[in-house]
Amino acid sequence: MNQSAKKINDGKNFDGYRPKNVPNALKVIHSELNSINQEETNVTQTDILTANSPINGKVTLWQYVKDLPKAVEWYSDIFGIESSDNIGLAYFFPINENTRLALSDLFMGDEKNELPRSVMLDFQSDDIFQTHRYLIEKGVKVGEIENPAWIYHEFYLWDLEGNQIRIHGFVHEKENDAQ
């Protein structure tokens, strides 16, 4: 390769283009993921991916209910989760390291408030057929399992106040389809 060709390609991609500004997120993903030993530094992938973001990667799913004590008991019993914190008008349930469910008084203590009904809660199940059977055994109102696309299956259930919740899962084994 002659010297001028080498000079043109230094620091550039295959077609000779070198962007003037590389987004910080790409810099972080490229350099940090390749150079950090995450076990030694206790840096998680979420830390890396949210390093230059105004959000921290943690998600709270809000479910507004009329009868908070009953809802706390129902969600604890049906989903096997316990509240880790409560601020009077809301109870928080850890789902995993970065996700929690918040059950909150629909009116936040004032019936004049017009807060939105909950957006769709959607939980993923590793075994959608077993989850469906389990919820039926618990006496939960559930719909039929549907298969709207390829290996994706879903069904709906309703909490004590009629809030619709979706459960979805991916079925990779054909024998589960017969259940």
Image (cartoon, rainbow, N blue to C red):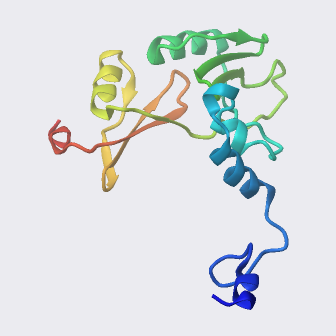
Corner quadrant of residue 140: top left
Q: Residue at x 68, y 54 (%)?
A: 30
Question: Is 67 left or right of 152, judged from the image as shown?
Answer: right
Corner quadrant of residue 125: top left
In this rendered view, identify the residue nearer to me: 4 or 76. 4
Image quarter hosting the C terminus = top left
How many marks the image carries: the answer is 0
In the image, farthest residue toward the front: 2
Residue 150's spot in the image, x, y percent?
Answer: 31, 56
Question: Is 140 left or right of 120, judged from the image as shown?
Answer: left
In this rendered view, identify the residue nearer to me: 41 or 174. 41
Res 65 seen here: no
Image quarter hosting the N terminus = bottom right
In this rendered view, identify the residue nearer to me: 117 or 2. 2
Residue 120's spot in the image, x, y percent?
Answer: 57, 40
Q: Residue at x 77, y 25 (%)?
A: 107
Residue 53's spot in the image, x, y percent?
Answer: 80, 46
Q: Residue at x 57, y 10 (%)?
A: 82
Question: Is 71 left or right of 88, judged from the image as shown?
Answer: left
Res 30 seen here: yes
In this rendered view, identify the residue nearer to me: 65 or 96. 96
In the rendered image, the vertical position of residue 153 relative to residue 19, given as above or below: above
In the rendered image, the vertical position of residue 72 relative to residue 63, given as above or below: above
Q: Residue at x 32, y 20 (%)?
A: 134
Residue 169's spot in the image, x, y percent?
Answer: 37, 40
